[in-house]
Amino acid sequence: MTLTAEKSALRRAALDARTRAASADDLEQAAARANRALGAVLAERFGTGLRGIVLSGYMPMRGEIDPLPAMRAHPGPVCVPVVVAKGAPLEFRRWTDGCAMEVGAFRALIPRDGEVMVPQALIVPLVAFDRRGARLGYGGGFYDRTLAVLRSAGPVLAIGLAHAAQEVAELPIGATDMPLDAVVTPEAVIWPEAAERSARSGSPPTRP
């Protein structure tokens, strides 16, 4: 089986698991726990400098955990990703609670206006993840390209946000796949070994 076919099969199963998790009776409480954990991770990593950190979130869709509480609570600027072209990195447009929104690529909501920003921390949606920090997305490669560009310029914290049911034992990794520094679920904060070393040293993490 090719890498693409293997990822496609895993993607279908993980999307089914995410749909089931999103229909759980305690979804609202689970999302609240995940958002509190996100805030704690950001506060621990950046401390008193958090106000100066540009945070990228996302507008939830298709069963993704809602990160809006953590975005609203962030003391610094917040932005959301915008797809500008196929095969290109994402652009990030400033978001404020209540700002005018419009439908962008793949039917994701994006700010109608807003300055373009460069995030130092990102809340990243995903389809599946493993404990090495490997991430399976929707197949477009947008976050992989984006993280590669951002990390080439300096340290960036990429935090996956997911239901616990989206965890798999091991994802196949390609040469261009970018790892997450941490994954937050309603039940746990998972720091891959490489990310733990990076957090202690202050240097950007490397791919496992």
Image (tube, helix red, strand yellow):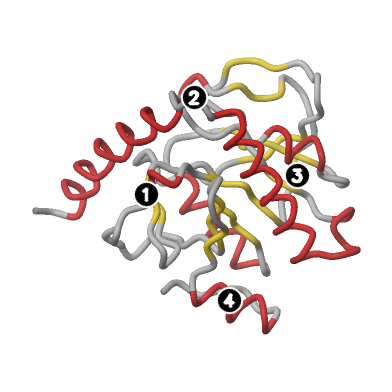
Disc 1 or disc 2, which is closer to the eye? 2
Work out how far the residue at label 1 is from the one at label 2, CA to CA, in angstroms: 26 Å
Sort mark 3 into few (<14), some (14-19) or many (20+) by Cα contacts within 10 Å.
Answer: some
Looking at the image, the residue that sits furthest to the left is 1
Report whether 111 appears left or right of 3. Answer: right
* Residue at the disc numbered 2: 25
Amino acid on which disc 2 is placed: Asp
Horizontal and vertical percent position of residue 171: 29, 58
Residue 62 placement, left or right of 151: left
- The answer to which of marks 4 and 1 sits earlier in the sequence is 1
Q: Which residue is mark 4?
A: 196
| In front: label 3 or label 1 | 1
The amino acid beneath tag 1 is: Leu
Nearer the camera: disc 3 or disc 2: 2
- The first of marks 2 and 4 along the sequence is 2
Q: At 81% from the left edge and 29% from the top edge, which residue is drawn? A: 96
Q: CA distance from mark 2 to mark 4?
A: 34 Å
Looking at the image, which residue is at 73% across and 41% down?
70
Is residue 82 shown above or below 61? Answer: below
SS type, badge 4: helix
- Give the mark toward the camera: 2 or 4: 2
Where is residue 135? Give x, y as percent. 41, 54
Check disc 2: other Cα within 10 Å, few if <14, some if 14-19, many if 20+.
few
Q: In terms of sequence position, does the residue under pointer 3 or pointer 1 come before the other?
A: 3
Crowd rating for badge 4 (residues with CA inside 10 Å; few <14, some 14–19, many 20+) = some
Quarter of the image where one finds residue 29: top right
Q: Earlier in the sequence, mark 1 or mark 2?
A: 2
